[in-house]
Image: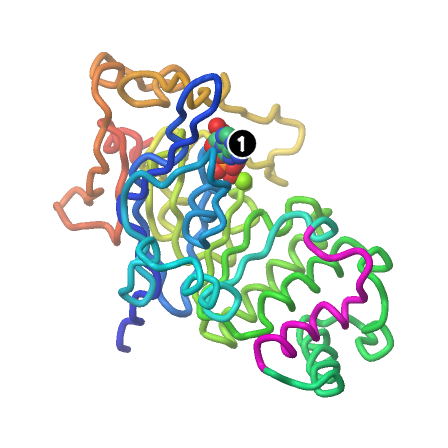
Amino acid sequence: MEPSPVLLEVRDLQVEFHTREGSAKAVNGVSYTVAAGETLAVLGESGSGKSVTAQAIMGILDSPPGRITGGEVLFRGQDLLRLKEEQRRRIRGAEMAMIFQDALSSLNPVLTVGAQLGEMFEVHRGMGRKQARAKSVELMDRVRIPAAKDRVNDYPHQFSGGMRQRIMIAMALALEPALIIADEPTTALDVTVQAQVMDLLAELRREFDMGLILITHDLGVVADVADKIAVMYAGRIVETAPVHEIYKRPAHPYTRGLLDSIPRLDQKGHELYAIKGLPPSLLHIPPGCAFHPRCPRARDVCRAEVPPLHAVTEEDGRASGERRSACYFWKETLDG
Ligand code: ADP
Ligand code: MG
């Protein structure tokens, strides 16, 4: 099989926030790629820079106080950071779309969902009201909202949280973008509904051969849908790997800590492990490896030098997929 072409390539992205308390490097040299039909899960605790990276890619960064200070965002080979706002606006929605955590505040409360969906087709596709409404119903069927025909004239608050999230997905899909970024799309939902929404996203990604970036703080929800994972900590990527390898044998102590914090059915009654301590404030990132104050493996070198992303190899020197770890002691970590 031919490898899919790379759709999005983020190279060495840097984003700073200038606030009264000082300047914070929210994104500090992030690089990743997404191919057509591929799902990248971006994982990390709250405040690690996942959303800011996404906002920089989409061109919706809160600026000021945020500022992109370096790097490239290549979409189909073109650097989006060099485009004029008008050109970017054309790409947004049509070529790449975003799904947010909170559908209720992302949807317009005073417009019916049919009016909001229909507007996408009227404004971007030049359809008339009636045709746009028919397309809206089709799309609501697509994301499996029951009785779409009857519900197209309902308002967002008349839907359950899970159904509202489906409407957001429908909005994002409307113009059949090549790339979707879903930022914690299921965080506000209960566990059963979470799984249904994840399954739907995975299915639509396959059907439309889209690239998908799935941002989450919960390693538990992405195991079945992601192809690869990038783990972020304090504005940097600390590990990247194909999804199955990372579950079997993480190569960074932070990833191992996240894995050990997932509740497991077979361990009922055991106390759940949690990584000790808190992520650092970005105004005071620890020197060396930012994770070292919380790391059970930290040694002198970790306190002194920022670890680069090492290629992770097997014992025979074979590269192990596209694995990388920003830990000096990735080998010991792999071996548990
Ligand atoms: P997460 O990984 O939880 O999505 P974010 O990407 O939203 O984290 O934020 C990363 C960091 O960027 C935050 O911890 C904060 O320091 C900074 N930041 C984000 N948005 C703003 C803002 N609007 N103003 C100032 N700082 C911000
Ligand atoms: Mg976020």
Residue 116: quarter of image: bottom right
Q: Residue furthest left?
A: 317
Q: Give the colouring mode of the picture.
A: rainbow
Q: Which sits in the foreground, 92 or 245?
A: 92
Is 123 magenta? The answer is yes
Coordinates of residue 158 in the picture (x, y in percent): 86, 59
Coordinates of residue 163 in the picture (x, y in percent): 76, 61
Q: Which residue is located at x 33 percent, y 45 percent?
A: 240
Dot 1, how many residues are within 10 Å of its Cα: few (below 14), some (14-19), or many (20+)? some
Residue 289: quarter of image: top left
Coordinates of residue 293 in the picture (x, y in percent): 38, 15
Q: Which sits in the foreground, 224 or 124?
A: 124
Is 124 magenta? The answer is yes
Q: Which sits in the foreground, 7 or 191?
A: 7
179 horizontally vs 326: left or right = right
Q: What residue type is labelled 1?
A: Ser
Q: Name the residue under label 1.
A: 261
Coordinates of residue 318 in the picture (x, y in percent): 15, 50
Q: Which residue is located at x 27 percent, y 45 percent?
A: 71
Q: What secondary structure is found at the residue carrying circle 1?
A: loop
Q: Which residue is located at x 31 percent, y 37 percent?
A: 251
Above or below: residue 124 compared with residue 92: below
Residue 325 visible (yes or no): yes
Q: Quadrant of ligand 2?
A: top right
Q: Specify the segment rendered in magenta.
A: 106-125
Main secondary-structure element of the magenta-colored stretch = helix
Q: Quadrant of the N terminus?
A: bottom left
Residue 259 visible (yes or no): no
